Amino acid sequence: MSRSASRGRSSAPAHVATPSAPPRTSSLILAFAAVYLIWGSTYLAIRIAIETIPPFTMAAARFLAAGALLYPWARLKGKAPAPTAVHWRNTALLGFLFLTVGNGAVVWAEQWVPSGLVALLVGMLPLWMVLVDWFFGSGRRPGPLLVAGLIWGLAGVALLASTGGFGARGTIGLVGALGVSVGSITWAYGSIRARVIALPARMPLNTAMQMLWGGAFLLLIGAATGELARLDPSVIALRSVVATAYLAVFGSLVAFSAFLWLNSVVSPASVSTYAYVNPVVALLLGWAFAGEEITSRTLIAAAMILSAVVLITRRGR
């Protein structure tokens, strides 16, 4: 959250072709490094980007730029057929759920909530997936171990909230944390809907369309909240521009492409390890480069949340 068109990654279809030849070890290492490190670093990049660029406007620029680069490439490579009206409608829905609400909540919350803690909250996505799938998807009731994992993870969030680490501006930090959780729930719901609606067969085209829609909706929100009217290019720092470019190119294109490739050559359980590696990377980067405090209670809460995610992803595939 960051979730980067990141936040379209959960919609990847299961029918991605599997290469006949086994992947090279060096390629696997590079791909996992991209998913682990780049996606983990996007939370710090978001914090830097919104220092001088309004959050919704920054996110809109990120996804519109990435989508504009990816769409023509996806159409030309392999001569993909033009998407239908149904494809545009369905990718609009997913772009709204994943990027506008899901990722938009992350960039909005990082105005007050430390980036590492936002990453921890986003890392709870597998827990929300279990509940959303129960109520809106397959209807499968979680077993005892999954219920234990859910309770354990929520207890970790409660401990995290009790540290006061969600921000130093009164209740707004807790509101921001709640916003991230709501965004994760909409992400989970989008993942469920993506299984049953018609989408472009080629994943790059599907992703590009979601990014274009998500960026357009974020731009409208930025206009509606007065961000565009208040935007003053003279106060935008170079580091914020560089961070936004990093999010668009590396977070939304490079790391996401690596994720799609991994999804086609290794097991889903292996790919899902990003859910509990990204928060660790984000916590360390926030501590090292943004002065975000890591207390003993934060570490205990992080261990509770991440162990719950491990249990959910291993037992609740």
Image (tube, rainbow, N blue to C red):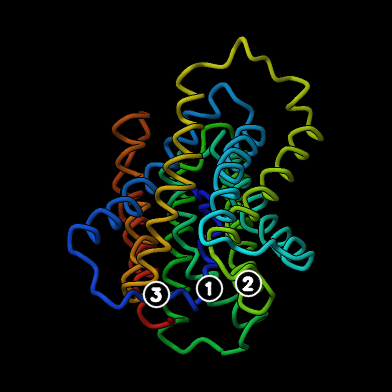
Residue 146 in which image quadrant: bottom left
Q: Which mark is residue 13?
A: 1
Residue 235 in which image quadrant: top right
Q: Secondary structure at mark 1?
A: loop
Task: Find out whether the residues at labels 3 and 2 contact each other: C-beta distance under 8 Å.
Answer: no
Look at label 2 and name its amino acid: Ala
Please tell me which of labels 2 and 1 falls first in the chain.
1
Which percent across, then down, holds residue 99? Answer: 62, 51
Look at label 3 and name its amino acid: Thr
Left/right placement of residue 263 relative to residue 175 reads left
Which percent across, then down, holds residue 152? Answer: 42, 70
**Whole-Å distance between the Cαs marked 2 and 1?**
8 Å
Q: Which quarter shows the C terminus? A: bottom left
Give the answer, above or below, for where 226 lies relative to 25. Answer: above
Q: Which mark is residue 194?
A: 2
Please tell me which of labels 1 and 3 falls first in the chain.
1
- Mark 3 lies on residue: 313
Of badges 2 and 1, nearer the viewer stands: 1
Which percent across, then down, holds residue 148? Answer: 42, 79
**Whole-Å distance between the Cαs marked 3 and 2?**
19 Å
Of badges 3 and 2, nearer the viewer stands: 2
Q: Residues within 10 Å of mark 1 (few under 14, many from 20)?
A: some
Q: Residues within 10 Å of mark 3 (few under 14, many from 20)?
A: many
Please tell me which of labels 3 and 2 falls first in the chain.
2
Q: Residue at x 51, y 48 (%)?
A: 4
- In depth, the one of 261 and 152 nearer the eye is 261
Q: Residue at x 63, y 72 (%)?
A: 194
Residue 310 in which image quadrant: bottom left
Task: Find out whether the residues at labels 2 and 1 contact each other: C-beta distance under 8 Å.
Answer: yes
Q: Residue at x 57, y 60 (%)?
A: 79
